[in-house]
Every structure is written in structure tokens, then in C-alpha cells.
Image (tube, rainbow, N blue to C red):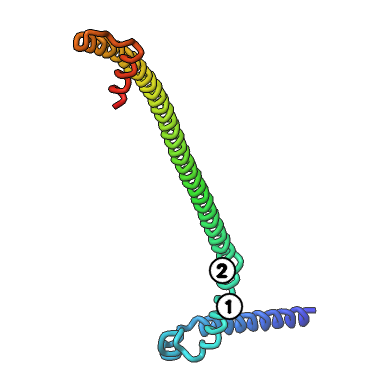
Amino acid sequence: MAENHSTGTLSTGSLATGSLATGSLATGSLATGTEATPPSEHGGGFPPFQKDTFGSQLLWLAIFFVALYLIASKLVLPRVGSIIADRRKRISGDLDEAARMKDTADAAIASYEKALADARARAQAIAAETRDKINAEADARRKAVEASLHAKLTAAEQTIAATRTAAMANVQGIAREAAVAIVARLTGKAPSEAAATAAVKAALDR
């Protein structure tokens, strides 16, 4: 039994010795792992310019470009497109409004010109009507004056004719009486009234 006990003690001591050896190896391994790498073991030059990293750099560049394209196409481009569409719509609306206002202005100008032409035509018509009316009234007054003058002239001629006839009758009577008196004085005998009237009439007709 004592022998077994001693054997167990040896085994335990051997295990402890092995554990210590294992710990020493682990410590050595850690020391070896943490040992600084000399600078000469690194590649020389700037890392992006090293040929060994070109492939990975190109891969990441492609991934970044694809990601940037997806972000631009999904987020930026639709927003820019909507802004451009809104701007185009606003410009189109402004152009339509300007065209509508131009049409309204043209219609107003055409209406004004038509009203001005109508007013000018009415003024010319009124002037022509007034001129014709004045001419007609002047013609009527002229005809009335001419008719009045003609009537007065006719009456005057008639008066003159009547006066001349009366005067001629008086002249014949006076001449007859004078002829009778002259013949009676010269011959001592008065002629007959019929002979004196015929002699005076013959003298006046000459």
C-alpha cells in the first residue's frame, strides 16, 4: 500500500513537471508571436502602388463604382429628374400663360381697332348725312328765294305792264285832246273825236 502511494506521488510529480514544461513552451510561443517584425521584411513603397494589391484595389473600385451608380440611379437621378420635370412643367406653364396673355392682348387690340374703325365710319356717315342735309336745306332755301323773287318779278312786270298800259291810255287821251285843240286853232274847225283818235294812234304806232 505504501508502494502504491509512492507510485502515485511520482506520477503526480511527473504530471506537474509536464505541466510546467508545457507552460514554458506556451510562454516561448507567445514571446515568439509578439516579437517585432523587422522593417526590412515589409514590402517597400506606397501600398496602393504595389503590384500585389492591384487586383483587390480594382475589385473594391468596381464595387464602389457599382454602389455609387446604384445610389445615384435610385436616389439622386430620380430626384434630379423630378426637379427637371417640375422646372420643364413650370416653364411650359409660363409659356402657355404668356401665349394666352398675348392672344388676349391681340384680341383687345383687334377689338380696339375695330371699334376705332366703326367710330370713324360712323363719324364719316354722320358728316356726310349732315352735309347732305345742309345742302338740301340750302337748296330748298335757294329754291324758295328764287320762287319768291320770280313771283315778285312777275308781279312787278305785271304792275309795270299795267302802269304802261294805263300811261299809254292817258297819253292817247292827252294826245287826242291836244291834237283836237291844235287842229281847231289852226283850221278854226275841230275834228271829230274818231278822226283825232285814229290820227293819234297812227302817230304812236309809228
Please name the amino acid that badge 1 sits on. Answer: Ile
Furthest toward the left, the residue is 186
In the picture shown, does residue 85 fall above or below 24?
above
Left/right of residue 202 with respect to residue 37 in the rendered view: left
For residue 143, which quarter of the picture?
A: top left
Q: Mark 2 points at which residue?
A: 72
Question: Mark 1 packing: few (<14 Cα in 10 Å), some, or many (20+)?
Answer: few
Furthest toward the front, the residue is 188
Give the mark nearest the N terminus, 2 or 1: 1
- The residue lying toward the viewer, choosing from 130 and 162, is 162
In the picture shown, does residue 189 fall above or below 118?
above
Residue 98 x %, y %: 50, 52
Q: Which residue is drawn at 43% across and 39% down?
A: 124
Residue 24 visible, this orientation: no
- The residue lying toward the viewer, choosing from 131 and 100, is 131
Q: Name the residue under label 1.
A: 63
